[in-house]
Amino acid sequence: MTGMRSYNELSPRSLNILLIMGDKNAKVGAENDSCDRAIGRHGCGARNNNANIKLKLRKVKQQGQGKRQLEIGKLKCQNINKEFVLELRNRFCALADSTDEDPDIQTKWETIKNTYVEAATKILGYRDKKNKEWLTPSTWQKIEQIKQLKVKILNTKSLRLQKQVQEAYKTKDKEVKKSAMNDKRAFVAMLACKAEGAARRGEMGAVYKITKQLCGKNSSQSAPVKDKDGNNLLTESEQAARWVQHFREVLNCPEPEHPANPTPADNIGLLNINTSPPTETEVRSAIQITKDGKAAGSDSIHAEMLKADLNTSVKVLTDLFRNIWDKNVIPVDWEGLIAKIPKKGNLQNCNNWRGITLLSIPSKVFCRILLGRIDTAIDTKLRQEQAGFRKGRGCTDQIFTLRNIIEQCLEWNYPLYINFIDFQKAFDSLHRDTLWKIVQSYGVTPKLIALIKMFYHRFECSVITNGNLTDWFPVKSGVRQGCIISPILLLIAIDWSMRKTTSDKPRGIQWTLFTQLEDLDYADDLAILSTNHTHLQEKTDRTDRFEHKYLQNPSLHIWDVYSRTNQSCICIGQTLGPEPVHPASCSQRLTHPNISHPAPAAFRGLQLLLRSFKGNVSARSSMK
């Protein structure tokens, strides 16, 4: 009896080998879509549930092609920063003695890129993905103990011993939950302190990031998307192909029927812009201005890596940029990686995602030098009504001006019509050939235009989805998202369009004794002003007509038409086309006589920011 009890209390070895035998009832079917590594190309019948289970076990999970992230945060440590600088200098010194006398631009760039990445990999290493980072080491130790108790429960044959282990498991489980709860509260309190410090320093990006973390929302995760007909796409390859199809359509718009052909500026009309190769002073200033904490492009070089050893970075990049400047050729891998950002609505629809292009940081440094050459000169040529992407101006200035206009019209009983217009996907639909002609008509020198155009020659992008990179596809329309030169190019195109719209005759409101105010602009968001309905319709039609001359997929989106007559304030319909804009029974957002919120969208956005900040502060007090 004792021997039998001892035999029953024996437990198997902790290291078990699981053997999965064949299933005679499994039918894999005739197709091997997405399972070509598990089954052959020939089969018969229809796939059943047994085969799905078998293929799931057999199928090898595809590893992500996305690059691992470097631990850039370690550069904040002074000792590690010194090690990285020393490693970087040693590598460049060794290359100075062994490189060819006159390598081409691509070879020179590959050498610079590999040197930075290899030095960072050796000194900084890669970032480890942390799950539930709020758990402390003591809590993780308790979790390991509870795992061991779980194994004992499964391996114990004696009912008496199994019951004892289960009691210990329940006790330890309560300890783990209590410890995890305390860790979570301490972690939230720590985040609230970080939010307070970031708000005091004016780092609103950090405040917003902490707010999302406190809310527990991770909107950056990819969702399974549907095809254009609304059918579900089950495999990763089908979803990747759908993303390529979507962004290829968005970034490759059809040609305009009648593109504009503005007259280029003559030698007298050319702007006084320096066209000599970049200097070390310009490169140094461009690197210092580049913001930290931005995602790297396909080369994995971060701004912090360039700033760690500024003298070395200035020396190697100045030599590279001068070669690019003289030969009008850029490295072939200065391409773009499209990161998907979710918007509102059903995330299974690709149209509810916005693409942000991740570009090479060194290429951004070069573009910043170009922007510094043309920004001041172009700013003098733009209309005063434009406040987007211009130094010393902003959206709040336009809101303040528009509010004063509405209040004065109410006070003096003056008629006012406002048409709020947005150019849909203006960045992605600019016709490039027309854009270069418009830029040339504003007096930009041919040398700088050629340098800007080389970034668009054979420009390709790939979409980041589920940690993988899709196939590369060409981008033939619009300006590059994420490039610092793109806003000024868009402003030039919008400025040309609005000059043509308002050039025939005045249709605005009286601004001074001899001038009229036709519109208020913030990039591609316009507020067209008139004193009567006829003039408002004429300007809207002319805006739509000239839009078709430089946009490849023109589409005006009229948000609201605001009318202030002698009797009342009404909000008119949201239509555009050959039919005139007519009153409709829609939202009465601007009907209040004292105009408490003339720009509701902007004020709602400001209120959300204030609520987010207050939420971070209150989170700390609620945890005490």
Image (spheres, rainbow, N blue to C red):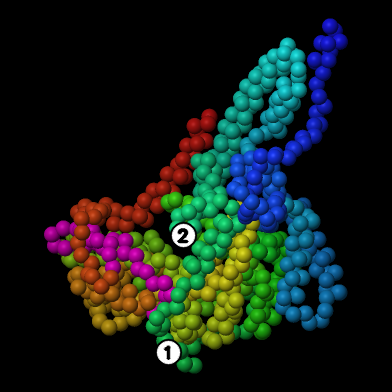
- Could you tell me residue 185's position as x and y percent? 57, 32
Residue beneath the point at 82% across and 27% down: 13
The residue identified by callout 2 is 228
Mark 1 closeness class: few <14, some 14–19, many ≥20 residues within 10 Å: few
**Which of the two discs, 2 and 1, sits closer to the camera?**
2
Mark 2 closeness class: few <14, some 14–19, many ≥20 residues within 10 Å: few
Q: Quadrant of the N terminus?
A: top right
The image quarter containing residue 112 is bottom right
Within the magenta stretch, is there residue 567?
A: yes
On screen, residue 313 versus residue 470, left or right, reads right
Q: Which residues are magenta?
A: 549-576
Residue beneath the point at 68% across and 55% down: 42
- Could you tell me residue 164's position as x and y percent? 71, 14
The residue identified by callout 1 is 263
One can see residue 175 in this view: no
Residue beneath the point at 80% across and 15% down: 8
* In the image, residue 514 above or below residue 1: below
* In the image, residue 421 above or below residue 33: below
Q: Secondary structure at mark 1?
A: loop
Give, as a three-letter code, the residue at label 2.
Answer: Lys
